[in-house]
């Protein structure tokens, strides 16, 4: 360890001095949208803010809280229950459910909302079939409204429970088997052991997964807008485009940021308060509880339901719509949409990986407080909703464009127009702010597996730090870089609110097209675009599932 530290110090002190300031400057630039939104808290918004407070702000707060409560209940039941069953119990299909329960992560919430609306609306196949079968007319029966706040909570829970499932399962797998067996020898049954021992031990991981799910809930725009529910994200849109008041929109975004930071503090507090330690000297294989008969069937059904309603059923409906409208999917317009989306996502992914590599390697070369803090700040964007980032990007870019245009008119009689706002540059910048964290965490994880002695050996052979990065580290990080790029690619492909606000005029993507068609009640027409997004999201989910399986150090019996 001493030799490694000494080698790392040698590399650090001989590294180029421009790396730390560049890392800090990048972090400040990427934090600019959030700083702008926070700064607008102190800017008077006039009568518009008072109007918002008097009329709709209470609805935004109440609906957001109720939506979070519903999603919290749904994701906790679905995520923790399935994680416990697939980890600790043996029943038919357990091996399949182990990875398949992650598949709903590939389904964006707004797309599942469109799908179930098409299925369950009055004119949909379910109610039409019921009326035909029972001989009922319209209004003769009660049917739950999918376009409602509880309906939105169910839609979001179906695609967000994998966050809780993934982290809770990892926590259950890492728990000491000896502790659980002691509980069983003291007379506690499986259910009591789960409630009184395993679940409290897994609390930090469960809270972390829940915080991620609730952040995604706050960031959602497509579902709540389509269902007509007033939340902060819809309010920001209406205030910006309907009332034309950027200051009031930024202040609403700042309130939304307060909710997000509260969730971050909750997650940190949960982790900081946990002090659990395994006492065993080596890990033991899990001997899963075999469930037979009715118990096995109930466990199978409990795992099947979230997979069925969160992925299989909506994916099947999208495939049916796409097949019915295959001609539209092969048209030039759809091809252009796909090229726009794929090109934008690929460009943003490449830039995100390059920046993550620069910042991550800078942190490795100079592990001082300023660089470590900069890397942390650069990775905060993932917790910030796309709506907030879009507002934070538009305000300074519009100010710069207007100021430059005014000066050029005054000095040279020329108009520069909009150079930054309303361009692809602004859109890609917003994507980088939002998703750099995904690439940065993956790259840092990969760099952490490379021993510092390799850096020292490279330097002793005469390579500069930049050459060491390019010729030594990048080849060793191929897998991590590919994973980072793929994750950012899919996130950009699915991103809706930031794209809606910042995209250039006459520029469209698959996500926006699906949203526009669904908003016009052309749900079946939105099938090809929505299915393309879902299929693109499957690959990283499969990679994630394989990574979890490889990292698992325990194994139960065969299925």
Image: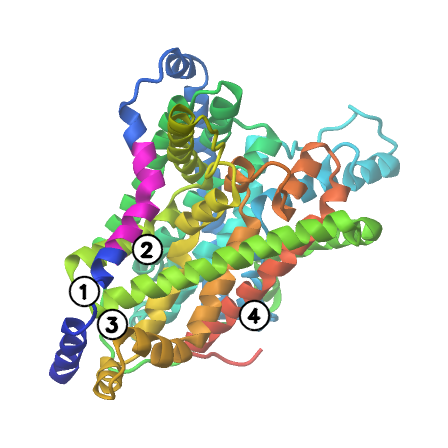
Which residue is located at x 31 percent, y 41 percent? Answer: 261
Percent across and percent down for residue 148 are: 59, 30
Q: Mark 4 and 1 residues: CB-CB less than 8 Å, in contact?
A: no
Give the vertical position of 184 relative to 42 (above or below). below
Q: Magenta stretch: give its range.
A: 23-38
Which element is circle 3 on? loop
Give the vertical position of 447 relative to 370 (above or below). below
Nearer to us in this view, 119 or 140: 119
**Marks 3 and 4, how far apart at CA:** 26 Å
Sequence-first tag of 3 and 2: 2
Q: Is residue 81 visible?
A: no
Q: Please state which of the two labelled residues, at mark 4 or mark 1, is closer to the viewer.
A: 1
Which residue is located at x 47 percent, y 33 percent? Answer: 416
Which element is circle 4 on? helix
Circle 1 residue: 17
Q: Please state which of the two labelled residues, at mark 1 or mark 3, is closer to the viewer.
A: 1
Total labels: the figure holds: 4
Label 2 packing within 10 angstroms: few (<14), some (14-19), many (20+): some
Give the vertical position of 230 relative to 222 (above or below). above
Sequence-first tag of 3 and 4: 4
Which residue is located at x 77 percent, y 41 percent? Answer: 126
Label 1 packing within 10 angstroms: few (<14), some (14-19), many (20+): few
Residue 297's image quarter?
A: bottom right
User: Would you say the magenta stretch is mainly helix, strand or loop?
Assistant: helix
Circle 2 residue: 203
Q: Please state which of the two labelled residues, at mark 1 or mark 2, is closer to the viewer.
A: 1
Circle 3 residue: 278
Please give the label number shown on residue 94: 4
Let me know if residue 26 is in the magenta part.
yes
Nearer to us in this view, 376 or 156: 376
Sequence-first tag of 1 and 2: 1
Nearer to us in this view, 397 or 130: 397
């Amino acid at each position: 360890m001493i030799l490694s530290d000494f080698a790392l110090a040698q590399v650090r002190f001989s590294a180029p001095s421009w790396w730390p300031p560049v890392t800090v400057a990048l972090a400040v630039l990427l934090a600019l949208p959030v700083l702008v939104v926070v700064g607008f808290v102190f800017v008077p918004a006039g009568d518009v803010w008072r109007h918002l407070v008097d009329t709709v702000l209470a609805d935004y707060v109440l609906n957001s809280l109720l939506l979070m409560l519903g999603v919290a209940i749904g994701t906790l039941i679905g995520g923790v229950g399935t994680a416990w069953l697939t980890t600790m119990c043996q029943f038919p299909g357990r091996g399949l459910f182990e990875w398949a329960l992650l598949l709903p992560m590939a389904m964006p919430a707004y797309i599942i909302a469109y799908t179930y609306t098409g299925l369950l609306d009055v004119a949909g196949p379910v109610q039409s079939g019921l009326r035909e079968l029972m001989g009922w007319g319209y209004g003769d029966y009660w049917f739950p409204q999918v376009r409602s706040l509880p309906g939105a909570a169910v839609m979001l829970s179906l695609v967000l429970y994998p966050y809780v499932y993934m982290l809770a399962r990892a926590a259950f797998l890492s728990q000491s088997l000896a502790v659980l067996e002691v509980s069983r020898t003291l007379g506690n049954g499986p259910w009591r052991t789960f409630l009184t021992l395993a679940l409290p031990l897994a609390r930090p991981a469960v809270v972390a997964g829940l915080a991620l799910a609730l952040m995604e809930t706050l960031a959602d725009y497509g579902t709540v807008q389509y269902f007509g529910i007033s939340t902060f994200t819809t309010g920001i849109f209406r205030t910006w485009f309907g009332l034309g008041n950027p200051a009031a929109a930024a202040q609403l975004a700042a309130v939304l940021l307060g909710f997000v930071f509260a969730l971050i503090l909750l997650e940190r507090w949960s982790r900081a308060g946990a002090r659990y330690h395994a006492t065993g000297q080596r890990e033991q294989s899990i001997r899963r509880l075999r469930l037979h008969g009715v118990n096995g069937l109930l466990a199978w059904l409990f795992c099947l339901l979230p997979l069925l309603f969160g992925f299989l059923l909506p994916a099947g409906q999208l495939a049916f719509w796409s097949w019915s409208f295959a001609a539209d999917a092969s048209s030039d317009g759809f091809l252009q949409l796909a090229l726009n989306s794929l090109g934008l996502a690929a460009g943003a992914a490449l830039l995100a990986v390059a920046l993550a590599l620069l910042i991550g390697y800078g942190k490795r070369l100079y592990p001082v407080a300023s660089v470590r803090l900069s890397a942390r700040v650069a990775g905060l964007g993932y917790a910030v909703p796309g709506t907030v980032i879009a507002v934070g990007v538009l305000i300074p870019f519009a100010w710069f464009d207007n100021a430059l245009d005014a000066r050029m008119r005054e000095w040279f009689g020329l108009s520069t127009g909009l150079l930054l706002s309303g361009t692809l540059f602004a859109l890609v910048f917003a994507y980088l702010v939002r998703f750099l964290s995904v690439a940065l965490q993956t790259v840092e994880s990969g760099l952490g597996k490379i021993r510092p002695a390799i850096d020292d050996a490279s330097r002793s052979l005469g390579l500069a730090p930049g050459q060491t990065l390019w010729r030594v580290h990048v080849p060793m990080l191929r897998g991590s870089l590919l994973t980072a790029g793929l994750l950012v690619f899919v996130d950009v492909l699915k991103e809706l609110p930031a794209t809606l606000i910042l995209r250039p005029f006459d520029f469209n993507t698959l996500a926006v097209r699906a949203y526009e068609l669904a908003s016009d009640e052309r749900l079946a027409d939105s099938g090809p675009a929505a299915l393309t997004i879902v299929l693109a999201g499957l690959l990283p989910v499969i990679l994630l599932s394989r990574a979890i399986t490889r990292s698992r150090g325990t194994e139960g019996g065969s299925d």
